[in-house]
Structures are given as structure tokens and as C-alpha cells.
Amino acid sequence: MIEFTFWDIVRNLLLAARWTVLLSLAAFVGGGVVGLVVLFFRIAKNKWAQRLASGYIALFQGTPLLMQLFLMFFGLPMLGLRIEPWTAAALGLTFFASAYLAEIWRGGVDALPRGQWDAGASLGLHYLQELRLIILPQAFSITRAPTVGFLVQLIKSTALTSIIGFEELVRTSNAINNATFEPFTVYGLVALIFFVMCFPLTQYARSLERRATTN
Amino acid sequence: MGYSLDFGWVADATGAIARGAATTILLIAVTTLAGTFLSILGAAGRRNGPLLLKRAIGVYVEVIRNTPFLVQLFFIFFGLPSIGVRLDPLLAAILAMTLNMAAYTIEIVGAGLDAVPRGQTEAALALGLRPRQVFVKIVLPQALKVIFPALTSQIIIMMLESAVVSQIAVRELTYEADMLQARTFRAFETYFVVTIVYLVLSMGLRRLLVSGGRRALGAGVS
């Protein structure tokens, strides 16, 4: 029987927290890229493209993330892909994030006055140039607070990947708890580590929001 | 590629799925009532309570909002017994969900209370209503009307999040799905069907809340 001191527990949890951070970043970047594609569909002039993107967003916002992860974990092997918990977790969270980010940014695009598009067109810009040079920079800038807010939600959501077997903070804490029988300490520490990761971001989102309302 | 989908098991599983869905609905119904009530108290306390209470509510909101629901659930179910508080899974799930939801809805309800013009309170006081009557009969109904869409979204988010309580063996929809796939070896099909059930539940819940809200709070609720 291995003896765990308090500092052994802390050290192991902190080592596991690296995976939580890595997964959050991967899902945020991946979700940003896919979310941009969804956004293009969502604000396209083609009605069917719009509907497709709306359906995609409604699907991911209307079902539990846990189910999305399970479907990814059990579904992809059927397509002949060898899948490990890390891949299923990163892909599942990427699609989840893409739907939310697309919806947040769509709100930013909708909030811009019609005149921005007209001004772009009158300068002779074509559709993609308008998006790249005029619309998207402004849409991103006014949605910065909710985007950071969603990053917090994403970090917390990585906890669910422990259920499909990805070795992040929560899964490691379950293992440590099984060895030490100190759930109060172990889960308390896990909560503290998540808090330390999320709270500064929450405060940052709040300050962005305040700045946006005073402008 | 020799995999073919098989949904033949669904006919035998409808009972289990319906039972699971019923438990999920029960969980979210209790959580909605308890969570909304708690958040009204919390929002009022945060505005008018003594300093210590305001601080405590602030800390509670920040702690819950910045930690994962799964960890809160494990802390309540596995952690609390070591200080002598032992809860059965269903009760632990309801407690965790209520505490989690209230942390989000306290801010929502608070924003609604702030949105009611001060003149409403002053007018009601001038008419001779007692402070509690003013809050319950004048301010709160107007605040609820403003925040109803945000409250609806939060309730649906909570319903989807409740899938996690299967991890402490509450026999709700996801738990039944776990049991089914262990029996049928049809994991993808099982979770696919249950995902559709969740989708139907969340759409139905939204529709129910919007029409219910319209009836209870009058026109103008969207």
C-alpha cells in the first residue's frame, strides 16, 4: 500500500491539471476554427446554408455534452477510425465549442448596423473582403466578453471527458480518492484548482463587459 | 467495414427509457422550483441583507460558477459523508443541481430586480403596502417577466447538465442508457436514441415554459 501525503495528492492533481489545460486550449482553438465555418454558413445569403447551420447549433445546444461525447467515443470506431479517449474528448469538445462560438459571434454580426455592409459594398469590396475587413473584426471585438465567458464554460466542461476515460483532473482525482479515501480533501482540491483556472477568466470577462457598456 | 446499425432492441427498451426520462423530468422540476425560490431569496439578500450575508452570497455564486458541476456533485455525494452528512443519490443530485442552478439564477433574478424602476417601489410604499408586500406583489412579478427568457434558458441548460448525475447512480435517462448499452452491446445506437429523447425533452420543455410563462405572467413573455 502506497502512502499518499497531502503534498503527493496536490502534486498528482497539478500534473493531471496540465491535461485539463491542454484539452481546453485544443477544444477552444479547434472550436474557433470550426465555429468560423459554421458562422459563414449561418450568415450566408443562401437560405439552406443558414438552415443547416441553425440546425447544427440547435442540435449541439439542445443535447447533453455527455451524450455528444458518448456518440463520438462509440460512433467514430464504426467509421473505421481507431479512437482513443483523447481524440474523442478533443473532437467532441471541438464540435460542442464550435456551435456555441458560432452562435455568440453571429450575435455580434447581427448587432452591426446594416450600413457597415453597405459601406463595404460601396467601396467595391466583395463579400469575403467585407467579412474579413469590416464585419468580422467588429463582430469579434464586441463579442469578446461572451467569448471569454464561454472559455470558462469550456474549461469546466472538460470535467465530463473523465467519464469517457480521458485522464484529466477529475479522472485522476477519482483514482487518488480510491487510494486515499479522502474525498473531502481530494474533491475540495480539484474544485480549488478549477477555481484558480476559471476565476481570473471570469473576472476578465466581467471587466470586458464593463468596458463595453461604458463605451 | 462490417458494422451495420441495429435498432431492433428499441421496442423492448421503451419502458426503461420512459422511466429514465420521467426521473430526469422529476429532477428538473424539483430543481426549477427549489432553485428559483433559492435564487429569489439570494438575490433579495444580496441587495438588502446585512454585509456578511451579501459577502457570503457573493462567495457562493463565484465558487459554484467557477467549478464544474461534476466536481460539485462528487464533493456533495462522496465528500460530505466524511464530515457526517450522508445523502442518498437522488437527494444528493437534487441538492447539487439546485445549488448549481441557483448560483446562475441569482444573477439573473438580480438583474431583473434592478430592471424594475425605483418609482414602482416608492409608489407602492406610498399606497401603504408593507415592504414585503411591495417585494412580492409589485417588484417580483415585474422582475420575473423581464428575466423569463433567461430563466428558461438556464432551466434547459440544467436539464441537459443533469445527464451527469448518472455518475452517482441516479436512475435517470443517461443511467438507463448506460444499463441498456451494457445489455445490448449497441452503444452507439443506444446513445443515439437517448440523445434524440433529450433533444425532444429540451424542445418540449422550452415550449412548455414559454406558454406557461405567458399564461402566468401575462403577454409580452417570449
Image: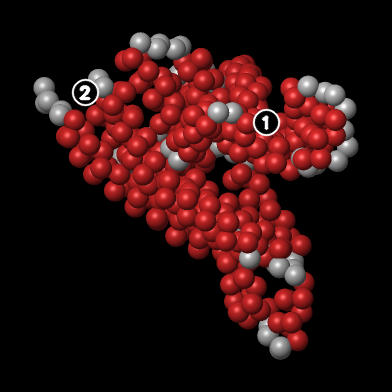
Question: Circle 2 marks a residue in which chain?
Answer: A
**Rendered position, A67 above or below A24:** above
Q: Which amino acid does label 2 sit on?
A: Thr
Q: What residue type is labelled 1?
A: Leu
**Rendered position, B221 above or below B186:** below
A39 or A192: nearer the eye? A192
Residue A174 locus on image (x, y percent): 30, 29
Specify whether residue B56 is in view.
yes
Q: Distance between the residues labelled 1 and 2?
A: 40 Å
Name the residue at 39% across, 41% down.
Answer: A195
Q: In this view, does A41 lie to the left or right of A173?
A: right
Q: Is residue B8 left or right of residue A178?
A: right
Residue B209 locus on image (x, y percent): 75, 31
Question: Which residue carries the number 2 mark?
Answer: A180
Q: Name which quarter of the figure residue A73 lies in.
A: top left
B17 or B128: nearer the eye? B128
Kind of element beneath mark 2: helix
Question: Which residue carries the number 1 mark?
Answer: B201
